[in-house]
Image (spheres, rainbow, N blue to C red):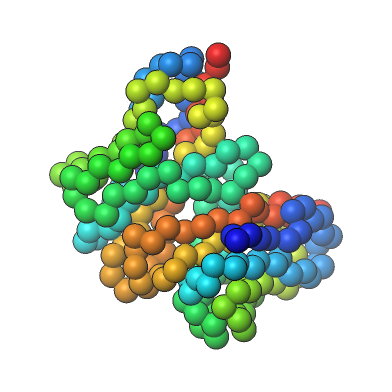
């Protein structure tokens, strides 16, 4: 079955540092890929998505590129802020028929001033 | 729009008790689902529904029951609570389960403790 693997956290950074959170996937066919963010005490929110190979999703300074050759969708941000502290989930969904999201285990990001 | 709402926010149950977690959305979404979130496990799908009257099992359905009598509501029933069901439960909805690029909207969660 489909699966998503994320780097384990927590990732601890100082404000304005560069962020990378690695995500790789195993899936048949050509799934759509997502990053969701969960702020403390809240539900998940969609951060960005990419629906086909070489697409780049971007939002709020975060970016991720759908790399089919390496089955990866790494999340990056050039300069993190304290307000970016949250748990980040990589996820995929198949593009055929009724399908459901498969999530990675999540990576906690802690940004200090 | 209120989006996806869940009640209660917190609940403590004793082993063997039953209860219903409520989920409602006001976006006319066809697709609704329930996930549980456990430390180090990410989110795992319990049950989902692609429209009123249609439900199906996800990855971890045992001990849970669902029904979908209206488009708006998708309650999750715990039949006989067990400590292994201590978790945070999230409800989510989207326009259609058939279009994978549609965003899923999540509720704020229900934190359940079973003693």
Q: Quadrant of the C terminus of chain B?
A: bottom right
In this rendering, the answer to whether A7 lies above or below B108 is above
What residue do we see at 47% from left, 59% from top? B104
Is A60 in front, or is B57?
Answer: A60
Is B98 in front, or is B56?
Answer: B98
Image position of A49 (left or right of B66):
left
Image position of B94 (left or right of B4):
left
Across and down, in percent, residue A75 comes to: 35, 35
Which of the 4 quarters of the picture holds residue B110? Answer: bottom right
What residue do we see at 63% from left, 59% from top? B2
Q: Quadrant of the N terminus of chain B?
A: bottom right
Q: How many marks?
A: 0
What residue do we see at 25% from left, 42% from top? A56
Image position of B12 (left or right of A69):
right
Which of the 4 quarters of the picture holds residue A23? Answer: top left
Is B107 in front, or is B27?
Answer: B27
Farthest residue, direction front: B1
In this rendering, the answer to whether A50 lies above or below A22 is below
What residue do we see at 53% from left, 48% from top? A44
Which of the 4 quarters of the picture holds residue B95? Answer: bottom left
In this rendering, the answer to whether B10 lies above or below A73 is below
Observer able to see residue B78? no
Observer able to see residue B52? yes
Across and down, in percent, residue B7 comes to: 73, 61
Across and down, in percent, residue B93 comes to: 52, 64
Farthest residue, direction left: A69
Is A104 in front, or is B90?
Answer: B90
């Amino acid at each position: 079955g489909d699966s998503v693997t994320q780097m384990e956290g927590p990732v601890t950074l100082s404000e304005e540092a560069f962020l990378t959170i690695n995500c790789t996937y195993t899936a048949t066919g050509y799934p759509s890929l997502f990053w969701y963010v969960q702020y403390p005490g809240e539900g998940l929110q969609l951060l960005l998505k990419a629906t086909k190979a070489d697409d780049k999703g971007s939002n709020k300074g975060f970016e991720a590129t759908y790399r089919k050759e390496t089955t990866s969708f790494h999340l990056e941000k050039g300069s993190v802020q304290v307000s970016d502290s949250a748990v980040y989930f990589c996820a995929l969904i198949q593009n055929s028929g009724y399908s459901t999201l498969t999530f990675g285990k999540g990576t906690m990001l802690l940004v200090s001033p | 729009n209120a989006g996806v709402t869940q009640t209660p926010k917190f609940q403590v149950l004793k082993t063997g008790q039953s209860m219903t977690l409520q989920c409602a959305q006001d976006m006319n979404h066809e697709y609704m689902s329930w996930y549980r979130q456990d430390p180090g496990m990410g989110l795992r799908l319990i049950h989902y529904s692609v429209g009123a009257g249609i439900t199906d099992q996800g990855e971890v359905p045992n001990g849970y029951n669902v029904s979908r009598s209206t488009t708006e509501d998708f309650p999750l029933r715990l039949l006989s609570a067990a400590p292994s069901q201590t978790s945070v439960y999230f409800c989510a909805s989207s326009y259609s389960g058939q279009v994978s690029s549609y965003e899923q909207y999540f509720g704020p969660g229900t934190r359940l403790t079973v003693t």
